[in-house]
Structure formats: C-alpha cells, structure tokens
Amino acid sequence: MLGVLGGMGPMAAVDFMAKVVRNTPASRDQDHVRMVVCSAADIPDRTAAILGEGADPLPAMRDALRRLEAAGATRIAIPCNTAHHWHAALQAGTPLPILHIVDAVADTLAGPPGAAIGVPATSGTVRAGIYQSRLGLRGYACRIPDDAAQAEVMRAIRLVKAGRLPEATAILRREAEALAAAGCREVVMACTEIPVALAAADGPVRAGLVDATEALARSCVAACRPEAAPVAA
Amino acid sequence: MLGVLGGMGPMAAVDFMAKVVRNTPASRDQDHVRMVVCSAADIPDRTAAILGEGADPLPAMRDALRRLEAAGATRIAIPCNTAHHWHAALQAGTPLPILHIVDAVADTLAGPPGAAIGVPATSGTVRAGIYQSRLGLRGYACRIPDDAAQAEVMRAIRLVKAGRLPEATAILRREAEALAAAGCREVVMACTEIPVALAAADGPVRAGLVDATEALARSCVAACRPEAAPVAA
C-alpha cells in the first residue's frame, strides 16, 4: 500500500493522487493502486525553514510518516519537492522505502547527460540545492532562474496555494519560456504547485515541460502494481 | 483530522478531496483541513453485493476504517453513495462519527418538502433505497430512472471508472435532462462518479444539478474547521 506524505500543499497532494490513478492501467476500481494519504496541511512552510525564517517542518513530517506507518503503508512518496531536503532524515527514521522525486524526474529526462535543465522551483528547493546536487550526479547541468525571476516563481507558487490560478499561470508560463530561451530544452516543473497552474498551458513551451509530480506518480505505479493484483469483486 | 474512507472509485476519492480543499477558505497550506485518506481500491463492488452478485464489501471497508483510526482520524466521510448501505454497520463498529452523504445533500436542497428530486445513482444505491428512505424522512419524493434509463446510468458510471469520460458525459447529460423533463427541479448526482463526468456540463440542465460529493465536502469543512485553526509556520 502506497503511503503519501502530502498536504504540502493540499491541492498538490490531490493532483499527485489523480496522476497516480490516471497512470494506472485499469478498467475497474479493483485494478488501482491502494493508497493511504496523510494530507498534513499544518506542516510548517518548507521554504521558510530552509531560508532560516520559519519553524522546522521535520517533526510534523515525522508525525505524518508515523500515521502512514500505523495505517499500513509499505512504501512512501512525498509530493513536495522542497520537502526532499529532509528525505535522508525521514528515511533514517523508517524501514519503509521513500521514493525520491528527483530520481523519478531523472528517469524521464530525454536530453543527453550534459544538457541544461531548467528548474523553476521554490526558493527553498533552489537554496537547498535539491535538484542541482541530485541531477548533477546523473550528469545534468541545472539552470536556476535569476534572483528577479526566482521572486516571480515564488509569487506564482503562493498564488496557486491561494487558489488564484490564472495569475499564477501567466507568471509561470513567462518564466518557463525564459528558461527555454536561455538554452534549456527541458524545463522541470520542480514544485508540485507549478503543474497545477501550468496544466492548461499550450504552445511551444508545453513540449519541453517535465512534470515532477507526474514522474513521481509513474514511479509509484511501477513500484506498487505488483501489490495491486486484481481482487475478485 | 478528517478520515476519508475512499477508493470507491479511486478518482471519486480524488474529486472529493479536491472539493474539500476548494471549499476551505484559505490563503496558505496551514489554513486547510488535515485529512487522512485510505484509498482502498480493492473494496469489492458495492452494487454487485447489493444485487446479490458479488462479495460482501463490509470486511474491506472495516479494514480501511481501522487504518484511518490507527492514523488518528477523528471523524469519517465516505465519498461513495452506494457504500452508505453499510453506514449503520460501520458506525456500530467505531466511536468516530461517520457523516452521512444523504444528510449532506438534504441540507443543500433548495426545493420545498414534497418536491420531486431526481436521483441518478448506481443500481445498488437505487435497490437499497438509500436516497428514497433518507430523503423521504425529510419530506422529499425521489424519482428514480426507469429500468432502461437505469441501465444507461450504470453503463456511464462504468465508463467513468474506465476513464472514458466523454462517452459517460453524453449519457449522463441525457438522463439528467430526462429527469428534469419529468418534473424534477433538482437532480442529485448521487454516485461520486457522476460529477466527475458531468463537471463540464453546461446549458439548462446544469442549474438543477446537486453534487452529492460537493455537499459532503462542505459538511466536512464545516465540521472540521474548528480543528484546522492556523498553526504558526
């Protein structure tokens, strides 16, 4: 049973679950992956913590993980890129395997090693170097928005959390296009709020967008389908 | 913490969670309702059981309820209308209050008592009389599709579960219009799969549609918001 440590933000967890369901070959309920999801919306802001401006979210994340263990989860996914700053700390506290979202993304990149990959993400994800370090191990060069563009990306992410999607979509499309114009053939939507706003994007920018949430969902389906053997109804 | 006994079907649970999030006044993650969701997709088919053609789903529902209790849920919602046939049996086995979807729907009906309410639903929900009995207590008269129309509604519900939304939308729109033409000013989408397919419906039929999933989500937000007091981030 897949355990989802979610709520960061709440709609991103919903988007992730929908992507797990849509990426599962199924013709009836019983074909689907069993999931237990803890949407712990009260987990303190991850970016604020990384920037030294807010409470440590690790205790609340550990609490959610304990609830998933109690409910019978057998492996864990975290649909929040920034939360992966605490991946190793969480993994050290549980025997359950925790999938890593950057590994899932790396498995879906089409470009050759050495290619520049655009990474719009939260300021916490950027500052913590979550993508730079782990994609670097796979031979990719991350390109991060400059300071002014990064401020715009953060503003758009907060707009998604507040339900103001059209404004967020306009900002994120502009920043994704800027990364593409700077030489990135692929741009990873490296915050779970970004695909919520860019789902409706069309035009040339769309082809090069890599959805980190979707990549994680596909990895989960591949990992869990053996447990999801059909049950007689 | 709201416990969601879901997975019947998997996308309906996702739709329900999205409606909880959207119906919560919030400007940041920490304003949202905390949820734990068990998407137990392997629960045997509810309609098949009620029609005497399939395995009893109650043991699997009780297992999911136990997982939600273990994870710390304090009240329970079941985003599956047909599963409410076992509402009393589930409630007898837990001290946690289980909201009832028909009560949530009744609270949102605009028509005066005595009004005819159209109820397209699974054949299990219809046969078990879930809406007829509980809406009847509130003074409403349920109108159920005739046998041929009921077969079409069931076919559309199975198409949603298989991800074939456009075909399902066409069928359900036709059946909702038929109930409206037969004198129902309000038509309850009384299977959680129906709003998934009818979300995009427009035209005159839209105004009279009551979304049972949305009604349950609103009841849950109203019940849970006192626990969702903002936490310092």
Image (cartoon, coloured by chain):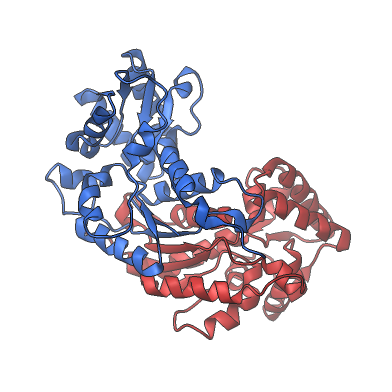
Chain colours: A blue, B red
Q: Position of residue A50 (x, y in %)?
A: 16, 44
Screen quadrant of the N terminus of chain B: bottom left
Indicate the quadrant where residue B212 lies: bottom right
Query: Would residue B118 be visible to someone looking at this image?
Result: no
- Residue at image position (38%, 18%) is A185
Q: How many marks?
A: 0
Indicate the quadrant where residue A95 lies: bottom left
> Residue A62 versus residue A221: which sits nearer the camera?
A221
In the image, is A169 to the left or to the right of B29?
Answer: right
In the image, is A29 to the left or to the right of B129?
Answer: left
Q: Position of residue B39 (x, y in %)?
A: 51, 61
Q: Position of residue B225 (x, y in %)?
A: 38, 66
Does residue A114 lie above or below A17 as drawn?
above
Screen quadrant of the C terminus of chain B: bottom left
Query: Would residue A173 be visible to someone looking at this image?
Result: yes
In the image, is B123 to the left or to the right of B194?
Answer: right
Does residue B197 lie above or below B61 as drawn?
above
Q: Position of residue B3 (x, y in %)?
A: 44, 68
Indicate the quadrant where residue B203 lies: top right
- Residue at image position (45%, 62%) is B37
In the picture as drawn, the residue positioned furthest to the front comes out as: A226
